[in-house]
Image: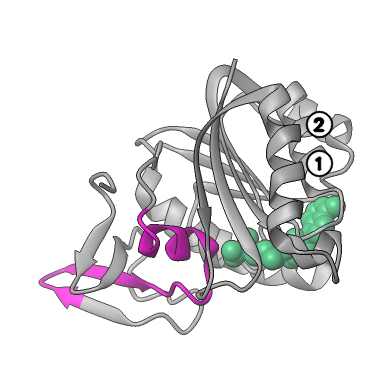
C-alpha cells in the first residue's frame, strides 16, 4: 500500500502540492479548502504508472535526500518534491539544457529541488556537491541505464538505502524481446542490490520495467 503523502481520488493517485497555484505540467488539480492535490498522471510519470500497477515499496519519507537521474522537465520530481516536503532535497541531474530551463523554473517554486546540469554517466563530476542519498531514482532511457545507476550508487548512495529504476527496453535494444532485456538488467542489479520489487509497466508505459532495490 502506498504510504501517507500519496493520496487517492478514485482510481487516481495524487500528491498534496507544496507550491499551490503553480502547475508543473497540465496536471489536474483538486482543491479542498486551502489544499491543492495534484493528480499524478500515470501516462506522464513512470512512478505513477508503477503505483497504478500495484507498487508496494514506496520508501519515501519527509526530509530524505534523493539523487534523481534524468529529471527532464520536472514532472515526476515535482510529485516526489510534494511527498518528501520542504525538509527533503532532490538533486535533479539532467544533461539537456532545454529541459534544464523548465527544471530551473520548477525549482523556483520548489526549494527542495536542486537542478544540476550534468551527465549522469560521470557522477565524479558532481559527487562533491551532493550529500549521500537515501534513494537514487534513475530514468535516463539510455542503453547503459543500469550501469549509470550503479556508478552513481557506488559514489552517492548510503548503505541500506534504496534505488528505483525505470528500465526502457527499447533504449537497450529495439528488436530483442523486452523480457530477455529485463532478465539481463535484473542480473546486473542483483550483483549490487537486493531486489525488492519488479513491475512491468505495460500498458501504461510500453516496454518498460520498474525495479525497487536496496543497497547492501
Ligand atoms: C524519460 S526522460 C525522464 C522523465 C522524468 N524522469 C520524469 O518522469 O518526469 C529521460 C531524461 O533523461 C535525460 N538523460 C538521458 N541521459 C542522461 C545523462 N547521461 N545524464 C543526464 N540526463 C540524461 C534526458 O535528457 C531526458 O530528459
Q: Kindly state the secondary structure of the residue where label 1 is placed.
A: helix
- Camera-side residue of 69 and 1: 1
Please name whichever residue, 20 or 155, is drawn nearer the observer in this view of the structure: 155
Q: In which quarter of the image is ligand 1?
A: bottom right
Q: Residue at x 35, y 76 (%)?
A: 21
Q: Are marks 1 and 2 in contact (CB under 8 Å)?
A: yes
Image location of residue 188, percent across then percent down: 76, 33
Residue indicated by mark 1: 148
Residue carrying label 2 = 151
Residue 99: % across, % down: 74, 70
Rendered location of residue 212, percent (x, y): 53, 40
Residues packed near mark 2 inside 10 Å, few (<14), some (14 to 19) or many (20 plus): some
Q: Is residue 173 magenta?
A: no
**Residue 46 lies within the magenta run:** yes
Magenta segment boundaries in residue numbering = 31-54
The one of 184 and 56 positioned closer to us in this rendering: 184
Q: Is mark 1 within 8 Å of ligand 1?
A: yes
Q: In which quarter of the image is residue 171?
A: bottom right
How many residues crowd around disc 1 within 10 Å: few (fewer than 14), some, or many (20 or more)? some
The image shows residue 41 at horizontal and vertical percentages of 43, 75
Side (left or right) of 12 relative to 173: left
Colouring method of the image: one colour
Give the distance between the C-alpha atoms of the residues marked 1 and 2, in whole angstroms. Answer: 5 Å
Residue pictured at 39% horizontal, 40% vertical: 57
Residue 70 occupies which quadrant of the picture? Answer: bottom right
Is the C terminus in the top left, top right, bottom left or bottom right quadrant? top right
Amino acid at each position: 500500500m502506498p504510504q501517507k503523502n500519496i493520496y487517492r481520488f478514485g482510481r487516481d493517485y495524487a500528491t498534496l502540492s507544496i507550491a499551490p497555484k503553480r502547475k508543473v505540467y497540465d496536471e489536474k488539480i483538486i482543491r479542498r479548502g486551502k489544499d491543492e492535490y495534484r493528480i499524478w498522471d500515470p501516462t506522464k510519470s513512470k512512478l505513477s504508472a508503477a503505483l497504478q500497477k500495484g507498487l508496494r515499496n514506496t520508501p519515501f519519507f519527509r526530509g530524505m535526500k534523493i539523487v534523481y537521474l534524468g529529471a527532464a522537465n520536472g514532472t515526476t520530481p515535482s510529485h516526489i518534491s510534494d511527498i518528501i516536503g520542504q525538509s527533503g532535497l532532490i538533486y535533479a541531474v539532467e544533461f539537456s539544457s532545454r529541459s534544464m530551463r523548465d527544471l530551473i523554473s520548477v525549482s523556483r517554486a520548489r526549494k527542495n529541488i536542486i537542478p544540476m546540469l550534468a551527465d549522469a554517466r560521470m557522477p565524479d563530476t558532481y559527487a562533491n556537491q551532493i550529500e549521500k542519498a537515501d534513494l537514487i531514482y534513475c530514468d535516463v532511457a539510455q542503453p547503459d541505464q543500469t550501469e549509470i545507476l550503479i556508478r552513481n550508487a557506488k559514489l552517492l548512495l548510503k548503505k541500506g538505502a534504496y534505488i528505483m529504476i525505470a528500465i526502457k527496453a527499447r533504449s537497450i535494444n529495439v528488436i530483442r524481446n523486452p523480457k530477455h532485456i529485463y532478465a539481463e538488467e535484473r542480473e546486473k542489479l542483483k550483483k549490487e542490490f537486493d531486489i525488492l520489487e519488479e513491475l512491468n509497466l505495460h500498458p501504461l508505459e510500453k516496454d518498460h520495467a520498474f525495479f525497487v532495490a536496496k543497497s547492501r
